[in-house]
Amino acid sequence: MKRFKKMMAIMMAMLCMFAAFPAVEADAATVTVNGGCTTRATAYNWGSYSITNSILVVLPESEDDFWAKFTLPRDKQIYIRCSYSTENEGMYIETRSETRLLDEKFSPEDVLDADTILPFMAVNCDNLTSSTQTFYVHANRGTAAGTLYFTLSMNERIKSGRGTFSFSGTASNPGNSSINPAGVDSSVLSLNLTRNTDIPPAAIVKRVSTSGTQSPRQGNVHHMIMPATQPSIWYTSIYTDNASGDYNIDTSDDIEVRQIWQFKYNAMSTAKSTMSRVTLKFEWEYDIANTGYKTY
């Protein structure tokens, strides 16, 4: 029975490894590390960041700790995925920089997908500095007994996506009868995306554009949008177009997609007009640490 459990643990660790790499490149490699990496000084050298290699760790019964060191390039945000089996219950895993703890997870409370055939734990590691840095992943057996088997792999955390969402109603503009050089704004439409489950939690706007149908069509029209988190700022399209708008908004503005958005348009024409079928089109980035490490 003990030999059977050992073989099952190895098989599960390998299965988790293959699941983490659905499209592994030809030069992908899995290295088995069998003991001896018990301190920072003796840490296994995992090398530079790569999603095409992983470690199959065999932690002997006589050892409590496994350490590995690796380097991340500037502005890189990843997570270390650690396969899990019930034989490893009680172990914990953490990531560290040269000077501090970055993230830590404990089993069984921090095990993800616990009811599936591929349970795992995940610890984050961010290099938000301006140069390549060295980091460590450290696993400790905790209360787990016997020889432990688990795989470690590096994975991207920051993902991209897109979506298009429609406003209801029609915006109306009374026309610029007073010939105001600033033009005249229309009525305001509102779109609540706070509970839209098609958008990843905490997704950040990478790019946003609008489209709509103006009747009658006019020149010198600017689309305008306002996110609820910035209630005093109306972002104005960078070009004039009655049918579309584009905006100087990117990830550096740190604006979440899941919120209430408002729309209006500014017209210079003296004639009245309306705008219907207004849509918001987003490109976004999101951190899968906010989604239970699931990809949208």
Image (spheres, rainbow, N blue to C red):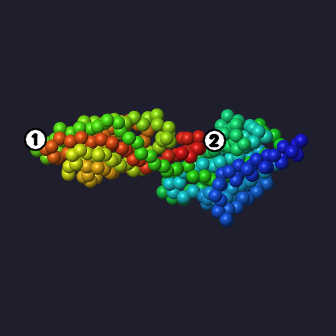
Point out the image quarter for the N terminus: top right
Q: Quadrant of residue 293?
A: top right
Horizontal side of residue 296 vs 57, given as left or right? left
The residue most toward the left is 178
Q: Tell me which residue sits at (64%, 62%) in the image.
A: 25
Q: Is residue 157 left or right of residue 255?
A: right
Q: Position of residue 212 (x, y in %)?
A: 31, 46
Position in image of residue 125 (x %, y %): 58, 49
- Tell me if residue 19 can be seen: yes
Q: Does residue 75 sit above or below 61 in this rendering?
A: below
The correct choice, above or below, for 51 with respect to 107 in the image is below
Q: Which mark is residue 178?
A: 1
Between tags 1 and 2, which lies in front? 1
- Which residue shows up at 33% across the image and 47% down it? 211
- Tell me whether the residue at label 1 lies in contact with that at label 2, contact meaning CB atoms closer than 8 angstroms: no
152 vs 112, nearest the viewer: 112
The percent position of residue 173, horizontal first and vertical second, equals: 21, 39
Secondary structure found at label 1: loop
Q: Amino acid at mark 2?
A: Glu
Identity of the residue furthest to the front in this view? 216
Disc 1 or 2, which lies upstream in sequence?
2
Q: Residues within 10 Å of mark 2 (few under 14, many from 20)?
A: some
At 50% across and 54% down in the image, what residue appears?
75
Badge 1: few (under 14), some or many (20 or more) residues near its Cα, within 10 Å?
few
Numbered disc 2: secondary structure: strand
Quadrant of the snapshot with the C terminus: top right
Answer with the quarter of the image where residue 54 lies.
Answer: bottom right
Give the residue number, with chain letter if any, for mark 2.
104
147 sits left or right of 266 in the view: right
